[in-house]
C-alpha cells in the first residue's frame, strides 16, 4: 500500500486553477525574500531585529501536492505550514482540516500567507505537514528552502 507522501512545496506570488483542465498555474515562484526596515520606524527603541521575530507583511501562497493511500478516503486529515527561521525556530501556522473525497489518492492544497516571521538574514525553510486528524501525528512533510535578506537602516 502506498504511504502518505508530499509531492511538492512551492511558494509563489499567486496561483490559479484552470477551469478547463484543472491544472494549477503558479506565478512568480519565490526563492528569496528581501525586506528593509528603518530602526526609527520601530515602535520602541532598543528592539534587536536579529534577536526577536518581526512579522514582515508580504502576501504569498504556498502550493502543495500530496499522495495518500486509497484506504484514507473519507478520512479527516490536517495540514499546516511551518516557517523554520535561520536559527532553527519553528513558527507553526494554524491547522487546516481537510476531508479526503472518495477515489482521491493525489490532490493539491494551496495556502495563503500574509506575512513572514523574520529575525535576520539567512536560510529559512517552508515546511508543509500532513497530520493525522485523530492524534495529530505527522504522516508526511515536504520542504522548500529559501533565502531571506533583512536590511536594517539606522
Image (cartoon, rainbow, N blue to C red):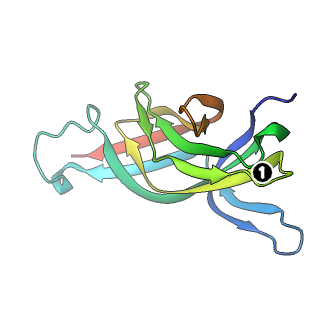
Q: State the image quarter where residue 32 is shown.
A: top right
Q: Which residue is pictured at 84% across the width and 66% down the height?
A: 22
Figure check: 26 above or below 84: below
Q: Nearer the viewer, residue 23 or 103?
A: 103
Q: Nearer the viewer, residue 148 or 20?
A: 20
Residue 53 position within the rendered picture, expressed as x and y whole percent measured from the top left: 31, 39
In the rendered structure, the answer to whether residue 24 lies left or right of residue 130 reads right
In the rendered structure, the answer to whether residue 141 lies left or right of residue 54 reads right
Name the element at disc 1: strand
Residue 139 visible to an observer of this rendering:
yes
In the rendered structure, the answer to whether residue 119 lies left or right of residue 123 reads left
In the rendered structure, the answer to whether residue 15 lies left or right of residue 67 reads left
Q: Residues within 10 Å of mark 1 (few under 14, many from 20)?
A: few
Q: Residue furthest top?
A: 88
Residue assigned mark 1: 107
Q: Residue furthest bottom?
A: 19
Residue 41 position within the rendered picture, expressed as x and y whole percent measured from the top left: 19, 56
Q: Which residue is pictured at 17% across the width and 40% down the height?
A: 47
Residue 73 position within the rendered picture, expressed as x and y whole percent measured from the top left: 78, 46
Amino acid at each position: 500500500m502506498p504511504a502518505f507522501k508530499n509531492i511538492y512545496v512551492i511558494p509563489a506570488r499567486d496561483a490559479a486553477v484552470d477551469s478547463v483542465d484543472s491544472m494549477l498555474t503558479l506565478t512568480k515562484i519565490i526563492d528569496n525574500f528581501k525586506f528593509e526596515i528603518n530602526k526609527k520606524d520601530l515602535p520602541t527603541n532598543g528592539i534587536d531585529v536579529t534577536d526577536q521575530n518581526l512579522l514582515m507583511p508580504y502576501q504569498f501562497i504556498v502550493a502543495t501536492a500530496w499522495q495518500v493511500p486509497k484506504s484514507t478516503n473519507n478520512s479527516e486529515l490536517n495540514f499546516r505550514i511551518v516557517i523554520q527561521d535561520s536559527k532553527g525556530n519553528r513558527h507553526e501556522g494554524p491547522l487546516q482540516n481537510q476531508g479526503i473525497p472518495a477515489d482521491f489518492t493525489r490532490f493539491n492544497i494551496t495556502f495563503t500567507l500574509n506575512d513572514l516571521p523574520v529575525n535576520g538574514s539567512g536560510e529559512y525553510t517552508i515546511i508543509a505537514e500532513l497530520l493525522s486528524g485523530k492524534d495529530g501525528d505527522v504522516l508526511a512533510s515536504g520542504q522548500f528552502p529559501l533565502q531571506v535578506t533583512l536590511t536594517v537602516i539606522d
